[in-house]
Image (spheres, helix red, strand yellow):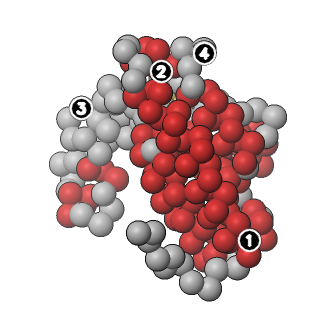
């Protein structure tokens, strides 16, 4: 029995984006995710002939990562947030691991745009440079608790970032350690 569509009052653009994400999840992510899950060696997942690269390439072709762009599809901020959530849900339905990898893969573009710095936007948001980003949050001595802004641990002065950056002239010096599981760390 099919699920009832609970998204009501979507515009044609919003519905098209949701349907595009669903089709991509069904036709690309599910079958290629199964292939990746069956590889005997984790190193095979990032080999140059791995199906993983097809997932990233086909995702770029769809252009869904531009939802973080303020001007994307002429959507108002609330509509853009709703569509981003719907697209994320559809991709997660397709394959949770690949959805996380695709989402994290665009973090550098999102943060460049949020910075408001033209040089960063130009460097990281150029479609001709399809770089893959990563997300290094978890630290060995306290996990990812420092990001849990709604939890009491966020205000605990004993929980401090292990890995910090400080500016030294024109350069940044990074000191500290992140945990071994950096999302997209092996491909970013």
- Mark 2 or 3: in front is 2
Q: Residue at x 62, y 85 (%)?
A: 9
Quadrant where the C terminus sits is: top right
Q: Residue at x 20, y 35 (%)?
A: 141
Question: Please, what secondary structure does the residue beneath circle 2 have?
Answer: helix
Task: Give the distance between the C-alpha atoms of the residues marked 3 and 4, in whole angstroms.
Answer: 33 Å
Dot 4, crowdedness within 10 Å: few (<14), some or many (≥20)?
A: few
Dot 2, crowdedness within 10 Å: few (<14), some or many (≥20)?
A: some
Q: Where does label 4 land, which residue?
A: 49
Left/right of residue 30 with respect to residue 176 in the rendered view: right
Circles 2 and 3, Cβ within 8 Å, touching? The answer is no
Q: Residue at x 38, y 14 (%)?
A: 41
Task: Give the distance between the C-alpha atoms of the residues marked 3 and 1, in whole angstroms.
Answer: 43 Å
Q: Where does label 3 land, which residue?
A: 140
Question: Please, what secondary structure does the residue beneath circle 4 have?
Answer: loop
Among the 4 quarters of the image, the one containing residue 143: top left
Left/right of residue 19 with respect to residue 32 in the rendered view: right
């Amino acid at each position: 029995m099919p699920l009832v569509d609970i998204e009501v009052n979507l515009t044609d653009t919003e519905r098209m984006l949701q349907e595009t994400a669903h089709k991509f999840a069904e036709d690309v992510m599910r079958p290629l995710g199964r292939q990746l899950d069956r590889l005997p060696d984790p190193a095979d997942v990032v080999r140059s002939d791995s199906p993983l690269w097809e997932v990233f390439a086909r995702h770029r072709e769809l252009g869904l990562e531009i939802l973080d762009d303020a001007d994307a599809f002429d959507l108002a901020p609330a509509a853009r947030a709703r569509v981003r959530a719907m697209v994320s849900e559809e991709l997660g339905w397709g394959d949770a691991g690949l959805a996380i990898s695709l989402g994290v893969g665009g973090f550098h573009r999102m943060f460049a745009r949020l910075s408001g710095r033209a040089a960063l936007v130009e460097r990281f948001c150029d479609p001709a440079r399809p770089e893959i980003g990563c997300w290094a949050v978890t630290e060995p001595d306290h996990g990812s608790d420092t990001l849990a802004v709604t939890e009491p641990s966020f205000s605990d002065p004993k929980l401090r970032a292990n890995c910090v950056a400080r500016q030294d002239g024109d350069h940044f010096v990074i000191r500290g350690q992140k945990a071994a599981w950096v999302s997209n760390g092996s491909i970013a």
